Amino acid sequence: MSDDEENSNNDGGSSINSMNTGEKNIPNKPTSPSDLSALQDSVKRNGEMVFRAAGGKVIAKDKKRELYGFDRRNFILHQHFIRRDFNACKALIKEMTDEYSEMCEYPFCIRGKIARIEGNFRESLIWFGKAQSVNPLNGVYLREIGCLHFLLGSHVKASEVFLDAIKLNENDWAQECLLTAPTVSRRVEILTFLARLCEQRNDIKLAIEAQKKALELEPENLDIITNMGLLYARWQNDDQAFEAFGKALSYNPTHPQSILAAGSIIQTNGEHDVALTKYRIAAEKCEYNGPLWNNIGMCFFGKGKCVAAANYLCPLEWKICYNLGIVHNAMEQYSSAYHFLSSAANLNTRSAVAYMALAVVLTNLDDTLNASKAYDRALQLDNGSAQIRLNCAIFKAKQNEFKKSAESLEAFYKATEILFAADNLKRYLDQVGKSDEATRECSGS
């Protein structure tokens, strides 16, 4: 190798080193005549160092290297998507997938959303699956996949995917964030939202406490009073629930929600005429109310009369369909009862009583095979229900399955013992609470 070639190689190495360190492409300071000649044979073109041979021919070119992230064009894709320019989105996504292969998480997600908007659920499922494979710990993609399975009719698969999504993010920090908010005890909106959140998490006691604090800030807020009464009713504390509804009616005697809730408690206690009087007042304010006419219908059913106005107003309300099924079964119209009860079970697949009533109707229709399946489904949903256990025991006995009937009957006795114990405990706690209040009043006076 000649001295000139060796010096040119040295210069090339120095320029590459300067490129890697982010410095300008300037050769080292010449220290010998050969270095000076190499420097004279190098020129810059558009900021790039080019080396020439003695004849002027380019022999080397030092290119600048640029590193680009996978997400550098995501914001452009987002702009196209929010403008609903789906053709531009698809073209850009194709470019990005060709460039980055399977590392395009956000483009896959957007492509899945576009396919879902266009109604291509199976194609959308493929794209969200690709996004989930890039980021397996993102529960949002599993949720979207579960929704798509549900829309495609694969309900079992959808439930499995939803359970996997819940496992990825078991902790919901919304309640904790609300509790640590500095203004949580001074804002009615935050307290009512906290109560609704606790109710969804089945924490009824904490929901009632939040409603109480909100009521301290706005004592005459009918919505808060009514919601607190509904929470008491859900907690099976009818006395305090009725007291809350009565307080709401003292502020507004024609408040429809309070009248409806109070009437339902009266109706549960068997006072159908008094409940109908309450419902008559509510009907003047909200005539087109499905639950109202449902309760009116059940009052007439309790009195031996039947109406079907509620189903006309709310045909997709499962409770109304369930009640109509019970009514038709009592009238020995089993085909109509099956129609309404199957609708109720389809509208609310988590209702054990709907499947139990459906099993009773199927038994009356002599369809024992499907009746057995309906009982099994009801027990899967609520294994500790005394009512379901008793009906199942009767059904098994009629089918000469006495061993299974005895097992169901034993489970029925255990469930009733638990119910009696819970009822006694509730009465004891109520007495303790009343005595504590009396003690406080005496000490305060």
Image (tube, helix red, strand yellow):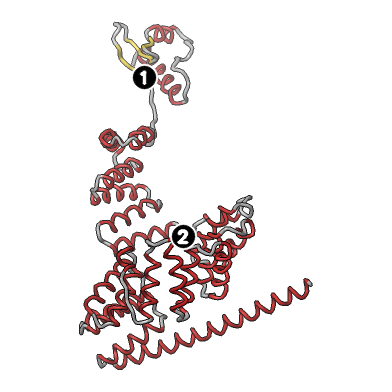
Residue in the picture at 45% in, 81% down: 270
Which corner quadrant of the image does residue 431 belong to?
bottom right
Q: Is residue 426 above or below residue 250?
A: below
Task: Between residue 13 and residue 186, name the one nearer to us.
Answer: 186
Look at the image and tell me in which quarter the C terminus lies.
bottom right
Q: Residue at x 56, y 85 (%)?
A: 424
Mark number displayed over residue 242 = none
Nearest to the eye among marks 2 and 1: give it. Answer: 2
Question: Marks 2 and 1: CB-CB under 8 Å?
Answer: no
Q: Is residue 146 left or right of residue 167?
A: left
Which element type, helix, strand or loop, lies under badge 1?
Answer: loop
For badge 1, the amino acid type reads Asp
Q: Quadrant of residue 88?
A: top left
Choose between 20 and 424: the one closer to the eye: 424
Report which residue position mark 1 lands on: 62
* Residue 304 drawn at (x, y percent): 34, 82
Mark closest to the chain's N terminus, 2 or 1 = 1
Picture residue at 50% right of the left edge, 66% below the top? 258
Q: Which mark is residue 170?
A: 2
Q: Amino acid at mark 2?
A: Glu
Element class at badge 2: loop
The image quadrant that residue 191 belongs to is bottom right
Between 416 and 326, the one lying in front of the other is 326
Vertical side of 75 occupied by 361: above or below:
below
